[in-house]
Image: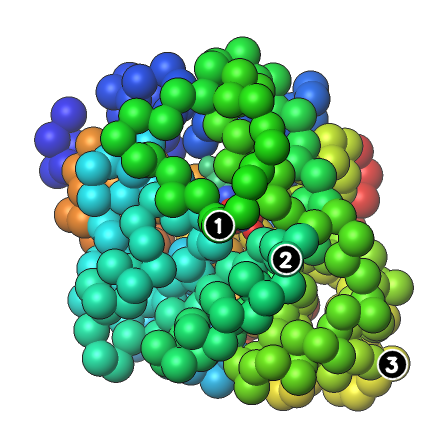
Amino acid sequence: PSLDEIVNLHDFEAVAKAILPPKAWAYYSSASDDEITIRENRAAYQRVWFRPRVLRDVSTVNWSTTILGYKSSLPVYISATALGKLGHPDGELNLTRAAGKHGVIQMIPTLASCSFDEILDAAVPSQTLFLQLYVNRDREITKRYVQHAEKRGVKALFITVDAPQLGRREKDMRMKFVDEGGVAKVQEGDTGVKKDEGVARAISSFIDPSLSWKDIPWFKSITNMAIVLKGVATPQDALMAYDYGLAGIVLSNHGGRQLDTARSGLENLVEVVEALKTRGPWPNPRFAVFVDGGVRRASDVLKAIALGASAVGVGRAFMYSFCAYGQEGVEKAFQIFRDELEMNMRLIGVRTIDELTPDLVDASALHAH
Ligand code: FNR
């Protein structure tokens, strides 16, 4: 179909499935074990209902916001997804160029197909970029990477903490990993993995499973970037992140690709925000809570923010948008978010993102499975 025929983000997924080579589709779409968590990520949003307000003069609505203090035209950021070139020859640059044009924030993955500098070179001067970090067993490599990113103007470091070992994504494991034409710019160092274990395992064996809270002061010593932990799931860890002086957390289960039957980020959000209220009124300007996983509609975004999230991360929906259509597909995905945000905000009765409060949703069924 032509881009004009795409009306929602699900359409991009159907097109990607139809056009991608089986190996790429397997890597992008797969989740771990029985793929229960990936389904739950969508289902959780469907257990939250709106309690819209009326007669609030919604002639003008504005969905721009700030994320970690940086302007964003959408209450959504592009989460890190590895290996963009499996889906399109321009890989991650599709996201960078679209994001630069539309004032959206992109989180660059450690395992991008394009090199870090290629991505930075494709950005416009005012563009805000974050970096997702997989921590290398060789800390010197990590230190150089982080400090180079800071020097090039990256604003925040999202350390992925839910992947001391990669999840078993069985669809992906059934595919042999053949690196055709340098799809993966694997980090330095011998990976020591046989290339017959699927894409995910072939590219990820450098990740250090010994990473612990004791390493946090070291990260703070090597960079002044805001540090956020990506992949937190409990109030206990949320409070530890707060007390270690970090800038925030992402409530995420890695799009269902890590621990299967982990709860959804949305479900964890409610109790995490309750716990953080022991540290001060919420929202707390010193600490951000992001949510990702399963977001396909602006209504999902508005629900998470109403329940206390600062902004929401989107992975697959943006990846799928560039597979057939490149940068234009990503721009269309932004347009779909804008159109849906405008309509939903009017119908809920809010004019700005700040006006989204817990009384606008009924989350009483969220914990009932
Ligand atoms: C990811 N994600 C991810 N996260 C991360 O920290 N480092 C990474 O390299 C990747 N790579 C990656 C590849 C692919 C193909 C997917 C689908 C996801 C997880 C990602 O950042 C985010 O947490 C989820 O994608 C959110 O769920 P949705 O939006 O895909 O449902």
Question: Which of marks 2 and 3 precedes in the sequence?
Answer: 2
Mark 1 → mark 3, Cα distance in angstroms: 43 Å
Q: Is residue 210 above or below residue 308?
A: above
Element at label 3: helix
Disc number for residue 278: 3
Element at label 1: loop
Which amino acid lies under the numbered mark 3 shown in the image of this protein?
Thr
CB atoms at circles 1 and 3 under 8 Å apart? no
Mark 3 → mark 2, Cα distance in angstroms: 37 Å
* Residue at 25% in and 59% down: 118
x and y percentages locating residue 127 in the rendered image: 29, 75
Question: Residue 240, can we see it?
Answer: yes
Foreground pick, 233 / 307: 233
Question: To which residue does mark 2 refer?
Answer: 138
* Residue at 20% in and 73% down: 124
The residue mark sitting in front, 3 or 2, is 2
x and y percentages locating residue 84 in the rendered image: 34, 41
- Residue that extends furthest to the top in the rendered view of this protein: 174
CB atoms at circles 1 and 2 under 8 Å apart? yes
Which amino acid lies under the numbered mark 2 shown in the image of this protein?
Asp
Question: To which residue does mark 1 refer?
Answer: 188
Q: How many marks?
A: 3
On whether ligand 1 comes within 8 Å of the CB at mark 1, the answer is no
Mark 1 → mark 2, Cα distance in angstroms: 9 Å
Image-based side of 84 in relation to 198, left or right: left
- Residue that extends furthest to the front in the rendered view of this protein: 190
